[in-house]
Image: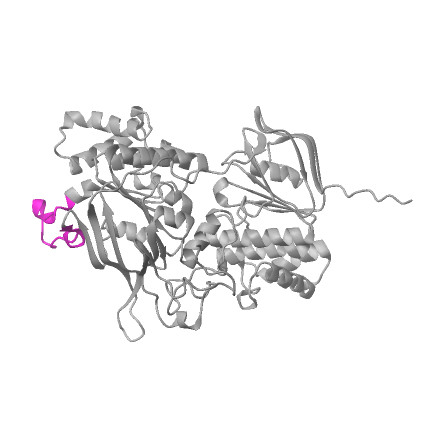
């Protein structure tokens, strides 16, 4: 009788330990990944994910000492950043990589690559083998990397921060396609990334690398801790706000402009939190800056406490002294404070934090005497979670998290009534983001501030918000209370953003259109599963479909692929 021995797993480690000097990156990890299994390993910056994948790939990082054992079959590593050789046509790089592993000529390698691109959902019209990688969109460059890996057909694929930096809906679509390929072809796939990178979404199993240990993954908190108080009367209004940037004259000398924001209306009440949700090119950041008149919008009005700020932000050219602020913009600057995505870059590198805060108080709060400013600065720093001696430091000496908290302290300094934040924690790790947002919401609740938060992190933005507005190509496509957008959004784009935030496969294909060549009609029609011929003929208006719930879609209530309606009952 013949006994067939079971196949061993392609990835097996026994008491694998990685150290840098006295620091333990990985402590006696025992790991087994089967064929066709997708494993995600998450961890913050510096947790050791890259070192672990390097060890599994047989390419340990310099300075990393390894103990224990690791057995990995025919492996292929996609390094962090997904770099391809610059200035070399993609066809030559495909021939080198695929040809090296499989012994194929250029034609055979390109044929295998074309099959891989099919698996990654890249249409033939988008396949530019003649271009170098730097001339490809980032999403297509990542799809080519994944397709190249599929063409090689390794037993084990290791991907470090795959598709990082792409919009959530695009990133999750690619990661799910990669996972589908791995399961279908029996490839052991290990995805490593930060918790916010979405690698857990398509995985069969998720581990978290914390303090040198591979531990069960704990999903981030996405629901508000407690019910939020109802907002007060609306005091900040936007009516028909638009933004257009001048371009070079046309061939016949005609004036041209690039319009990126189209007639936005919104109201923000005292103590209310409004989330502006959207991905690259949505113009959410442009809207946030327009509310601050940095710069003023080119169309419409921004009204704060009955004063049109857009008009007040443009004083007469010959105004000087007190006349240079005829509309009271200094008071508006005090009341409406910004939080920038790169707080460190918003500080003067040659001045201490304290000196810059003192100048801000002198300009915005001249009613505070000079001998009381130091105390006010210390209070603002402590409220933002920093020590008072931070005032003595230069911005260059602050870490990313410290700079973000210093930006929050600066915004709280003049005692504003509204905070307008454009991705204020964009560069922080998941743990740092959580701590920063907790500080921000605590300050909001303690002071009764209104908060406008622009972000591409759908559930994070709605976590502590009253309402949300989903933006696409400079227009609002859905507006509703936060609970509705968290549980039952109606617009296809909102539903795709929610799916990506949950780690699911978004029902969209392709990338967002360029503002320089927008499609006619609905901006989503080339990606949308509900698109019909009529979508190319007219921009859908923002219509009320339920009390307080507005949607801009011609077919939001239409059945999808002959199945259930695109509306959760």
Residue lying at the far right of the rendered structure: 1
Foreground of the two, 283 or 134: 283
Q: Is residue 261 magenta?
A: no
Q: In the drawing, does residue 552 fall left or right of residue 313?
A: right
On the image, which quarter does residue 85 sit in? bottom right
Q: In the drawing, does residue 51 fall left or right of residue 358?
A: right
Q: Could you tell me residue 263's position as x and y percent?
A: 26, 60
Residue 352 visible in image: no
> Height in image: 33 above or below 179?
above
Foreground of the two, 164 or 562: 562
Q: Could you tell me residue 338's position as x and y percent?
A: 27, 43
Foreground of the two, 22 or 117: 117
Q: Quadrant of the C terminus?
A: bottom left
Q: Is residue 313 magenta?
A: yes
On the image, which quarter does residue 407 sit in? top left
| Residue shown at 53% from the left, 56% from the top | 141
| Residue shown at 63% from the left, 54% from the top | 181
Count of numbered labels shown in the rendering: 0
> Height in image: 413 above or below 134?
above
Residue 375 visible in image: yes
Residue lying at the far front of the rendered structure: 569
> Height in image: 224 above or below 36?
above
Q: Which segment did they paint magenta?
A: 307-330
Q: Could you tell me residue 518's position as x and y percent?
A: 38, 66
| Residue shown at 25% from the left, 26% from the top | 378
Q: Could you tell me residue 305's position as x and y percent?
A: 15, 47
Q: In the drawing, does residue 200 fall left or right of residue 294?
A: right
On the image, which quarter does residue 210 sit in? top right
Q: Quadrant of the N terminus?
A: top right
| Residue shown at 35% from the left, 47% from the top | 482
């Amino acid at each position: 009788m013949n006994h067939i021995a079971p196949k061993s797993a392609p990835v097996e480690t026994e008491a694998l330990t990685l150290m840098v000097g006295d620091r333990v990156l990985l402590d006696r990890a025992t790991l087994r990944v089967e064929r066709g299994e997708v494993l995600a390993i998450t961890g913050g910056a510096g947790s050791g994910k890259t070192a672990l994948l390097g060890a599994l790939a047989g390419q340990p990082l310099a300075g990393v000492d390894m103990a224990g054992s690791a057995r990995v079959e025919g492996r292929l590593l996609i390094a962090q950043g997904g770099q391809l050789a610059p200035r070399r046509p993609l066809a030559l790089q495909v021939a080198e990589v695929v040809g090296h592993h499989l012994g194929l000529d250029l034609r055979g390698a390109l044929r295998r690559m074309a099959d891989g691109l099919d698996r990654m959902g890249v249409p033939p019209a988008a396949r530019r083998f003649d271009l170098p990688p730097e001339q490809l969109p980032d999403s297509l460059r990542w799809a080519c990397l994944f397709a190249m890996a599929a063409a090689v057909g390794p037993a084990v694929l290791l991907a470090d921060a795959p598709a990082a930096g792409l919009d959530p809906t695009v990133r999750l679509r690619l990661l799910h396609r990669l996972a589908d390929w791995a399961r279908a072809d029996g490839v052991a796939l290990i995805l490593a990334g930060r918790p916010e990178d979405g690698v857990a979404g398509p995985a069969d199993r998720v581990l978290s690398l914390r303090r040198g240990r591979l531990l069960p993954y704990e999903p981030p908190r996405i629901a508000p801790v407690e019910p939020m108080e109802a907002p007060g009367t609306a005091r900040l209004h936007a009516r028909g706000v638009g933004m257009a940037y001048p371009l070079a004259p046309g061939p016949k000398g005609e004036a041209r402009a690039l319009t990126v924001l189209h007639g936005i209306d919104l109201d923000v009440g005292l103590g209310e939190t409004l989330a502006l949700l959207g991905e690259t090119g949505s113009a959410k950041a442009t809207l946030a800056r327009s509310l601050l008149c940095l710069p003023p919008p080119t169309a419409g009005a921004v009204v704060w406490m009955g004063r049109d700020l857009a008009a007040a932000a443009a004083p007469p050219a010959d105004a000087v002294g007190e006349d240079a602020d005829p509309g009271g913009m200094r008071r508006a600057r005090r009341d409406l404070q910004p939080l920038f995505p790169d707080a460190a870059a918003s500080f003067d590198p040659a001045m201490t934090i304290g000196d810059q805060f003192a100048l801000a108080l002198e300009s915005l709060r001249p009613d505070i005497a000079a001998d009381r400013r130091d105390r006010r600065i210390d209070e603002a720093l402590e409220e933002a979670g920093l020590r008072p001696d931070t005032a003595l430091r230069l911005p260059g000496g602050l870490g990313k998290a410290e700079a973000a908290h210093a930006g929050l302290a600066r915004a709280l300094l003049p005692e504003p009534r509204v905070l307008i934040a454009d991705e204020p924690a964009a560069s922080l790790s998941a743990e740092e983001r959580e701590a920063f947002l907790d500080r921000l919401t605590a300050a909001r609740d303690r002071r009764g501030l209104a908060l406008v938060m622009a972000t591409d992190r759908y559930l994070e933005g709605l976590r502590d918000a009253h309402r949300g507005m989903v933006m696409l190509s400079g227009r609002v496509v859905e507006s509703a209370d936060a609970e509705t957008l968290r549980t039952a959004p109606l617009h296809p784009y909102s539903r795709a953003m929610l799916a990506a935030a949950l780690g699911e496969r978004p029902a969209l294909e392709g990338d967002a259109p360029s503002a320089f060549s927008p499609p006619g009609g609905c901006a989503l029609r080339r990606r949308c599963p509900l698109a019909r011929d009529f979508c190319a003929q007219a921009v859908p208006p923002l219509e009320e479909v339920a009390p307080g719930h507005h949607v801009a879609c011609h077919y939001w209530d239409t059945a999808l692929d002959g199945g259930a309606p695109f509306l959760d009952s």
